[in-house]
Image (tube, grey):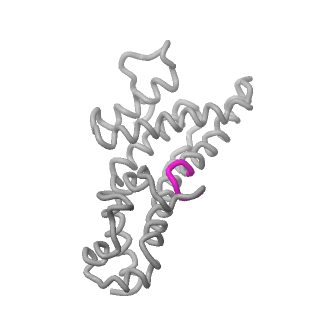
Amino acid sequence: MTGKERRQQLLDVARALFAEKGFDGTSIEEIAHRAGVSKPVVYEHFGGKEGVYAVVVDREMRDLLDLIVSALDAGHPRVLLEQAAHALVDYIDENTDGFRVLVRDSPVASSSGTFSSLLNDIASQVEHILGLQFSARGYDAKLAPLYSQALVGMVALTGQWWLEARKPKKEEVAAHLVNLAWNGLSGLEHKPKPMTR
């Protein structure tokens, strides 16, 4: 195995363990054992448990942020919201271990590398889009940060809940999120249908 392949193997093993047991419940010994290597190999690649954890979290954050930002390509605000909701629910469904790692608390978390900082990054992207939409429609663009935090928080917390519940289907979850965000409680549709997909 090349050094690059070994590093990737260690990251995959560590990601699964951090998702299963959390930061505190995972040890370098267990990472090494599951990878079939000695502890010094893990230390050589990452310097310790904090190092491997930081790389796993950074990779997951980058993947999720890229996925959501790349999904925001439609012109209509409701479709943008729908695309973001679908992107997050798709990520949770297809990268369950990665999402579990992101939403767990960590003693090595700082101002960067946390789920909260990831949500702030996503909210900044949404804020820019909302600001343009608010200005175009005559609303106060200064309120875009408030609305972006509300929307991202709603979608993220629902995503955390759906991670365990897995019902209803992800398409329905996204449709209901958009229904609430778009129509508000007073205008909820009884059976929301996605505009896309």
Q: Does residue 66 appear left or right of residue 96 in this picture? A: right
* Looking at the image, residue 157 lies above or below residue 47: above
Range of residues picked out in magenta: 112-117
Residue drawn at (29%, 35%) of the image = 169
Residue drawn at (46%, 40%) of the image = 156
Figure quadrant of the N terminus: bottom left
* Looking at the image, residue 1 lies above or below residue 30: below
Figure quadrant of the C terminus: top left
Residue drawn at (28%, 39%) of the image = 166
In depth, the one of 24 and 46 nearer the eye is: 24
Q: Position of residue 80 (x, y in %)?
A: 54, 37
Q: Position of residue 128 (x, y in %)?
A: 67, 41
In depth, the one of 120 and 178 nearer the eye is: 120
Q: Residue furthest top?
A: 186
Quarter of the rendering containing residue 53:
bottom left
User: Total marks drawn?
Assistant: 0
In depth, the one of 119 and 21 nearer the eye is: 21
Q: Please check the rendered image and state whether residue 79 is part of the magenta-colored stretch, yes or no.
A: no
* Looking at the image, residue 56 lies above or below residue 188: below
Q: Does residue 73 appear left or right of residue 167 in this picture? A: right
Q: Position of residue 157 (x, y in %)?
A: 44, 37
Q: Position of residue 126 (x, y in %)?
A: 60, 40
